[in-house]
Amino acid sequence: MMLSKNMRIFSAVAGVAVTLSMQSCEKEGSGATGWAYNDPKNGGYLNVEYTEQETGPGLVMIEGGTFTMGRTEQEIQHEWDNTPRRVTVSSFYMDQTEITNQFYRDYLYWLKRTYDVDFPDVALKATPDTLVWRDKLAFNEPYVEYYFRHPAYKNYPVVGVSWLQANDYCAWRTDRVNEFILVREGIQKMDAVGQVADNHFNTDAYLAGQYEGLVKNDIEDLDPSKGEGATRKVKMEDGILLPRYRLPTEAEWEFAALGLIGNTEEELITERRMYPWNGHIMRNPEDEWKGEMMANYKRGRGDNMGTAGKLNDNADITAEVNAYWPNDYGLYNMAGNVCEWVMDVYRPLSPEDVSDFRAFRGNVYKTIERNDDGTVADKDSLGRIKFRDVTAQESEGRRNYRKSDNINYNDGDRESSTSYAEEELESEDKIMYEFGATSMVNNRSRVFKGGSWKDRAYYLSPGARRYLDERLSTDHIGFRCAMTRVGSPVGLGKGK
């Protein structure tokens, strides 16, 4: 049937009106279905206003990008394990300073207050090894007794901490920061007395509904099936809780240390750096500070701090974590003071093997342990949600991975070894690197970066890499934490 001219005009206008009406509702409703968000009458679909990730305590944002990772110094050790390679690092957050003795003592205090009655070995296991200061031919006993506990050293970097202990600290810090956020936002009440043994705030346990705490004001539950006035716990979808604190990856640490953002005009890096500052010398060229050392390191045999009356680095061992000049990201002591643990498992060929985007070796995929009915398994005795390795059956049919542990992938697994078919190979450790016989490389070998108070200038180059067993510690290795950035790679107001 043919429409009259007036009817055709009405139909067109009506169509425009409907389109404009739907467009005007896009802010409150779904652009896919038109159903309103955050309205119990429509089923309670949740859509949270979210602008920017909060910067966690102690962190600074590291805007990511591409850079040449690897050696910028001569290869005097002839290890050939840091071949230059162009990679891209996503934006992330990193501690402005190394973790201090005070920060780590806060951690031990909490562990003792929470676990000492039922599990006194927890705090003991986390305590730094102060005996790392001992030297058979030096009088270092004062550091054994005083360095970690005396207030004179409270702002000095903690040492004697293994890679495993550093990871445990990161997990603890995640929980304390997220607990503080919930208290600050008026959702939880502070409960310093009641949190003992397994009854304490743990981010994973809270999200799994296995921690109640002292509730002050839960969030309104918009699900109409729950009834009017129903409330619920904070969920990941609310965007209130922060991502986990963790150790930085090797690529992240090196990228942040170089601080090339200060040498970039448009997309041109005007000067490639050997150290976290411009130039190839170790002294400050600025008139006000001319001749002062840029970092805390050992300048030569028997010279840890200069001459009396002119102690040009003002440190015989470590220095306070905010000493010297920060780099262009605002990070202190990314060269010198102490070396720092990173997440990566060491392999000499990692620069050639790893992906060029978010480069990392050390993935072990895990999942939350669940009961037969699919519910989350009960917390362990320390109040933490249980995780387990992903099984081969769960990975069946996947194209991006087939097993949980990918540390050895293409470097140390049977497929990458010339002896992969030999049945007499008794251990994964002996497939390629002959651990304990011809090398100290295995799946527990963790990378540490940067130079320390007892290293020469060569190791202050961010491209230098060394490794140590994750269970061991020294008097010159510390750490700092990092955090993943979610959403836009640039800060508030800079992105579209």
Image (cartoon, grey):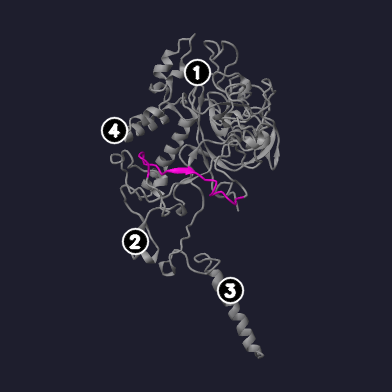
Looking at the picture, which amino acid does disc 1 mark? Answer: Ile
Separation of marks 1 and 2 at Cα, in angstroms: 58 Å
Indicate the position of residue 208 as horizontal and vertical percent values: 40, 50
Q: Is residue 139 visible?
A: yes
Residue 388 within the magenta-colored segment of the rendering: yes
Name the outermost residue toward the front: 423
The residue that label 3 is drawn on is: 19
Looking at the picture, which amino acid does disc 3 mark? Answer: Thr
Span colored in magenta: 379-398
Per the image, label 3 sits on a secondary structure element best described as helix
The residue that label 1 is drawn on is: 317
Separation of marks 3 and 2 at Cα, in angstroms: 36 Å
At label 3, counting other C-alpha atoms closer than 10 Å, the crowd grade (few under 14, some 14-19, many 20 or more) is few
The residue that label 4 is drawn on is: 117
At label 2, counting other C-alpha atoms closer than 10 Å, the crowd grade (few under 14, some 14-19, many 20 or more) is some
Separation of marks 3 and 4 at Cα, in angstroms: 66 Å
Q: Earlier in the sequence, mark 3 or mark 4?
A: 3
At label 1, counting other C-alpha atoms closer than 10 Å, the crowd grade (few under 14, some 14-19, many 20 or more) is some
Indicate the position of residue 171 as horizontal and vertical percent values: 44, 38
Looking at the picture, which amino acid does disc 2 mark? Answer: Ala
